[in-house]
Image (cartoon, helix red, strand yellow):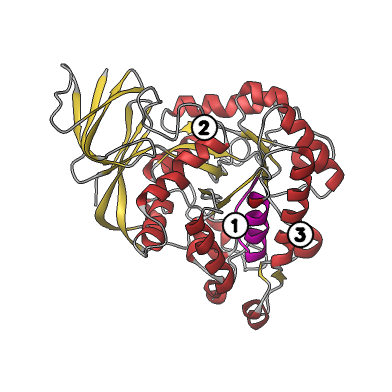
């Protein structure tokens, strides 16, 4: 089966010139690029991408799909449906399922469920420690053999520097990046939002920026000593970003990601006590958001990841102190990145593709992804940069509705998504 994505504006770090270029796909892989006057081969199905942006498939390095164990919030099938609707051809689910993904059987199960769903690719992240309880190392080699692309105790940061040091040595042996949720719980426990002027005003207990920064600094030192690759999850503070920038300058193997909500919202959003503004790390103050934008601009931040964290309506309907942390994000991420970063001139489209596709593929060593150069796997994200639309929680493909962006308007929408040469999503209503 042959598919030609014709006359789009190709955005790919490997593209020499890109307007009006057509991408030819055969048997799930990109087989070539055609210039505007080149004739396509016979028997080709053609998708007209005139006026559209054609990018290598976006890869979300950080999602929570809740299966196994909490299928009332999300399943792998519903999460993957939300992913492709948001432009993500691949998602990397964190291991905090029930039971925790700390062994090859669960890793394999997640991949099989994704294959059954037949939309987005799923590349699971295995646990660092058994049950993510911070004590005994999980079987990283077996999880890697089953398809895990990294390890993390996301949501339950490893408290012991000694265990983390051994985990990094072990992960390095298996060439697995360590995805690091940095939060010193001795500083943040009980906190429900960023510690600062707004938390004082609202009478809510704060989580200081320092809780994140202490762990970032600790783990950068450990990465330096062990030679492991650490990937800082959802970086959100000025001090954490400065530590990553310094470490990169010293050639320490560290990368980091930011969520759309951390480059869009600040802690003032909590003022209405909407529990869809409660997440960990919390929405920070203006100076931290400024630091995030600067780091997106200068390359310190490597990736945009959603931290898509579905929760049932009844759980989020609790009072602010008691509601769970986390928001959905798969379907609003690209709209937010276009609105807040591209249209405001923080980054250009080439950098957006680097943040959402090329770098995630490189960091998680996803072979033949993150590019559309001939020979690569034909995962493609196609965006209409002019299309204006409104996000509605009620339209979401996710099983959960906990987004603070209900009713937000966006300019630029993912209109078509191809996974391994197959059309898996097509926008129907504008
Ligand atoms: Zn986390």
Q: Does 246 appear in magenta? A: yes
Question: Residue 28 location, x and y as percent?
Answer: 36, 21
Callout 3 touching callout 1 (CB < 8 Å):
no
Question: Whole-Å distance between the Cαs marked 3 and 1?
Answer: 31 Å
258 or 193: which is nearer to us? 258
The boundaries of the magenta stretch are 231-248
**Rendered position, 30 above or below 401:** above
Comparing marks 3 and 1, which lies closer to the viewer? 3
Q: Nearer the viewer, residue 33 or 266?
A: 33
Under circle 2, the secondary element is: strand
Q: Mark 2 sits on what residue? A: 122
- Residue drawn at x 50%, y 27% as measured from the top left: 367
The correct choice, above or below, for 179 with respect to 190 in the image is above
Q: Nearer the viewer, residue 166 or 247?
A: 247
Measuring from the top left, give residue 309's x and y in whole percent.
56, 50
Q: Position of residue 381 (x, y in %)?
A: 35, 39
The answer to the question of whether label 3 and label 2 lie on touching residues, with beta carbons closer than 8 A, is: no
Q: Which residue is mark 1?
A: 315
Magenta-span inclusion, residue 112:
no
* Image depth: mark 2 or mark 1 in front: 2
Residue 174 falls left or right of residue 343: right
**Residue 208 showing in the rendered view:** yes
Question: First in sequence: mark 3 or mark 1?
Answer: 3
| Marker disc for residue 214 | 3
Residue 240's disc number: none
Q: Please say whether residue 402 is visible from this viewpoint.
A: no
Residue at the (37%, 65%) spot, across then down: 344
Quarter of the image that includes the N terminus: top left
Looking at marks 3 and 2 on the same chain, the residue that comes earlier in the sequence is marked by 2
For marks 2 and 1 on the same chain, the one whose residue lies earlier in the sequence: 2
């Amino acid at each position: 089966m042959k598919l030609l994505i014709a006359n789009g504006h190709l955005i790919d770090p490997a593209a020499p010139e890109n307007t009006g270029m057509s991408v030819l796909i055969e048997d799930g892989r990109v087989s070539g690029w055609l210039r505007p006057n080149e004739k396509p081969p016979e028997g080709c199905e053609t998708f007209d991408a005139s006026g559209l942006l054609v990018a290598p498939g976006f890869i979300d390095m950080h999602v929570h799909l809740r299966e196994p164990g909490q299928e009332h919030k999300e399943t792998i099938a519903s999460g993957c449906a939300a992913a492709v609707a948001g432009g993500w051809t691949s998602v990397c689910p964190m291991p905090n399922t029930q039971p925790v993904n700390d062994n090859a059987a669960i890793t394999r199960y997640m991949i099989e469920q994704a294959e059954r769903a037949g939309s987005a690719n799923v590349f699971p992240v295995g646990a660092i420690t058994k049950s993510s309880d911070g004590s005994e190392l999980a079987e990283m080699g077996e999880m890697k053999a089953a398809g895990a692309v990294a390890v993390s105790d996301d949501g339950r940061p490893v408290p012991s520097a000694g265990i983390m040091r051994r985990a990094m040595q072990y992960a390095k042996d298996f060439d697995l990046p360590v995805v690091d949720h940095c939060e010193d719980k001795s500083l943040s426990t009980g906190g429900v939002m960023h510690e600062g002027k707004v938390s004082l005003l609202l009478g809510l207990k704060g989580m200081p920026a320092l809780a994140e920064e202490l762990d970032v600094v600790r783990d950068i030192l450990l990465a330096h000593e062990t030679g492991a690759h650490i990937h800082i999850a959802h970086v959100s503070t000025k001090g954490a970003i400065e530590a990553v920038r310094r470490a990169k300058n010293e050639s320490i193997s560290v990368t980091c990601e930011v969520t759309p909500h951390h480059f869009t919202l600040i802690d003032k959003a909590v003022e209405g006590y909407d529990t869809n503004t409660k997440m960990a790390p919390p929405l920070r103050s203006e100076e931290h958001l400024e630091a995030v934008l600067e780091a997106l601009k200068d390359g310190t931040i490597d990736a945009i990841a959603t931290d898509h964290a579905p929760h049932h309506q009844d759980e989020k309907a609790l009072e602010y102190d008691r509601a769970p942390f986390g928001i959905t994000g798969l379907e609003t991420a690209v709209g937010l990145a276009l609105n807040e970063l591209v249209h405001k001139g923080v980054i250009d489209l080439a950098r957006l593709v680097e943040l959402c596709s090329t770098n995630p593929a490189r960091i998680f060593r996803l072979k033949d992804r993150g590019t559309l150069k001939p020979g690569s796997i034909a995962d493609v994200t196609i965006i209409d940069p002019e299309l204006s639309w409104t996000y509605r929680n009620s339209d979401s493909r996710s099983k959960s509705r906990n987004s603070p962006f209900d009713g937000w308007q966006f300019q630029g929408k993912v209109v078509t998504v191809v996974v391994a040469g197959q059309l898996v999503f097509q926008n129907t209503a504008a």
